Image (cartoon, grey):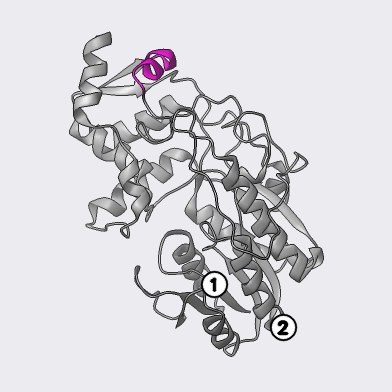
Amino acid sequence: MRILVLGGGWFLGRAVVSGALERGWEVTTFTRGLSGIPVPGAVAVHGDRERPEDLARLADHGPWDAVIDTSASELSPHVVRSGTRTLEPVVGRYVYVSTVAVYEGWPTEPLNTCSPVWAALTSTRPDTTQPPDSASGINPDYGRRKAGTEHAVTETFGLARTSLLRPGVILGPGEYVGRLPWWLHRTERGGLILAPGDPARRFQAVDVRDVATFALDQVVHVGHQVHNLGTPIGRETMGGFLQACMDVTGSTGELLWVEDEILLRHGLRQWTELPLWWIHPGVSVIDSSSAVAAGFHSRPLAETVTDTWHWLSQGNTPVPHRRRAKHGITPAKEQAILDSVH
């Protein structure tokens, strides 16, 4: 099997490349070469997806049985469409890692693969998006843009040659956004720890290695595939997640659970200031049963937490990324909230 990975230097892309090499496949990666470390054994081609001449040069390295696209999270439909049209003659199948944000009901409603998707932004011109609402953390424009990138894939390759994978939040070794690493470092520091909302709140995330494995499995599937990727609904909780962080770091701290209403009154930004805290009712009600029927397996969240802490403890550091600075409450603000309720 010969595959192309768009992205491949860090996090999900790197996990895909490593998994493909373990299967004995030939792998080509396409990255800008500005961050991350190349995976030994893969052929690295450097270029920018926004430069048509770089894409044309990449196509000269083909053909490939499939492409796995892990690096389109911040690209416009215009850019993705340009890439698919250049690669279509030299690629057999397109596996696109998208997001559950393409659904109109995300994150306020339970979701399955039949849920309505945002009307795609299909203009051939680059699109612009608005920033998310600071209070709720919801950004419909992001979902519309991602729906547009999905459409760019399927309109070029056709339904029969495409797999659309829609994970929720992805955690695990190498995470660059800083959600799980922030909680690990916070629990390690100890003391009285501000814990958000209800410890019994459902919590859905997916391990980066499980997404990579399933993406690789999709290479040999036939026909149009659309799957949500997440842990089973109700299997994990916020309390279990934070307790796993406490356990693996050997924390001597104490979790103080504070109600959502109090956190909102203090002006806490959902999803970022206390990473992974979101009060919307549909955020962890994502049905992944179709993926499970197709062979998807999601490991226990505690294993993801443990392996991420081990990865960090070995001196590894995520690649620098601008989104990392948005995550985490300042110690002064956390203490002020704790003082007000304790």
Tell me: 186 left or right of 234: left
Tell me: 36 left or right of 249: right
* Residue 252 shows in the view: no
The amino acid type, in three-letter code, at marker 2 is: Pro
What is the number of the mark on residue 5?
1
Judging by the rendered image, the residue that carries numbered circle 2 is 89
Image coordinates of residue 340 in percent, x first then y, are 25, 10
User: Callout 2: few (<14), some (14-19), or many (20+) C-alpha neighbours within 10 Å?
Assistant: few
Image coordinates of residue 332 in percent, x first then y, are 19, 26
Closest to the camera, between mark 1 and mark 2, is: 2
Residue shown at 53%/26% (left/top)?
202
Q: Separation of disc 1 and disc 2 at Cα?
A: 16 Å
Range of residues picked out in magenta:
258-267
Q: Is residue 22 magenta?
A: no
Screen quadrant of the C terminus? top left
Image coordinates of residue 338 in percent, x first then y, are 25, 16
* Residue 325 shows in the view: yes
Regarding mark 2 in the picture, which secondary structure is present there?
helix
The amino acid type, in three-letter code, at marker 1 is: Val
Q: Is residue 259 magenta?
A: yes
Residue shown at 60%/77% (left/top)?
3
User: Callout 1: few (<14), some (14-19), or many (20+) C-alpha neighbours within 10 Å?
Assistant: many
Query: Up-down: is 119 above or below 47?
Result: above
Query: Up-down: is 23 above or below 282?
Result: below
The furthest residue to the bottom: 60
Residue shown at 18%/33% (left/top)?
189
Residue 217 quadrant? bottom right
Residue 286 quadrant? top right
Task: Provide the major secondary structure of the magenta segment.
Answer: helix
